[in-house]
Amino acid sequence: MKYYIKQKVFSFKDQFVVKNEAEQDAYYVEGKLFTLGSKLHIFNTDDEEVLYVEQKVWRFLPEFEIYQKGKLVATVKKEFRFFKNDYSIIGPDWNIEGSVMAHNYVIKEREKVVAEISKEWLSWGDSYVIDIQNNDQRELLLGVVIVIDCVISANRNQGASS
């Protein structure tokens, strides 16, 4: 199943929509900025919260916990690497390969690709596509990708303001 997120339309303080293959609204994301640590709420089209994301405060590099139905299911941590934009996913046995900054990477479970993230030039505006191989994991995979993209956007905005 493919999902689309419009590039450069959101940050932790915004609301935005995740579209499905038919370019229909599939999920809504709402961010809260003026709290201790950033928070994201991801809702399905029935207004049910499917994921809650909370930034861990007092960390040198960004770290986020992802909750599903009140239970911690994953932690996404930005790692310090020269000339690379690396992230660790703790919880599921996933790793990231490719260029996160260019929206051209895969998420693997062991050696099997579970999601491919890439630029999509001919779709819903300037967007990127998340092609999820296992629909049972779609919400958690979407949450991981959204967290990574929000961190990248925040870093770009900080660089632009300095």
Image: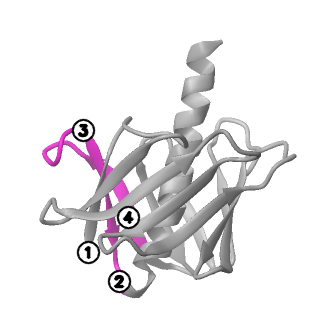
Upstream in sequence: badge 1 or badge 4: 1
Residue 54 vertical placement versus 149 (above, below): below
* Part of the protein shown in magenta: 114-135
Upstream in sequence: badge 3 or badge 1: 1
Label 4, residues with CA under 10 Å away: few <14, some 14-19, many ≥20: many
Left or right, 128 with reference to 147: left
Q: Residue furthest bottom?
A: 136
Which labelled disc corresponds to residue 18?
none
Upstream in sequence: badge 4 or badge 2: 4
- Kind of element beneath mark 2: helix
State the image coordinates of residue 114 (x, y, percent, origin top left): 43, 76
* Residue at point 58%, 82% (across, down): 69
Q: Quadrant of the C terminus?
A: top right
Say how many tags the image has: 4
Residue under numbered circle 4: 116
Q: Amino acid at mark 3?
A: Asp
Q: Quadrant of the N terminus?
A: bottom left
Residue under numbered circle 3: 126
* Residue at point 78%, 55% (across, down): 56
- Kind of element beneath mark 3: loop
Q: Are marks 2 and 1 in contact (CB under 8 Å)?
A: yes
**Residue 99 shows in this picture:** no
Q: Amino acid at mark 2?
A: Asn
Q: Amino acid at mark 4?
A: Glu
Upstream in sequence: badge 2 or badge 1: 1
Can residue 133 be found in the magenta stretch?
A: yes
Residue under numbered circle 2: 135
Which labelled disc corresponds to residue 1?
1
- Kind of element beneath mark 4: strand
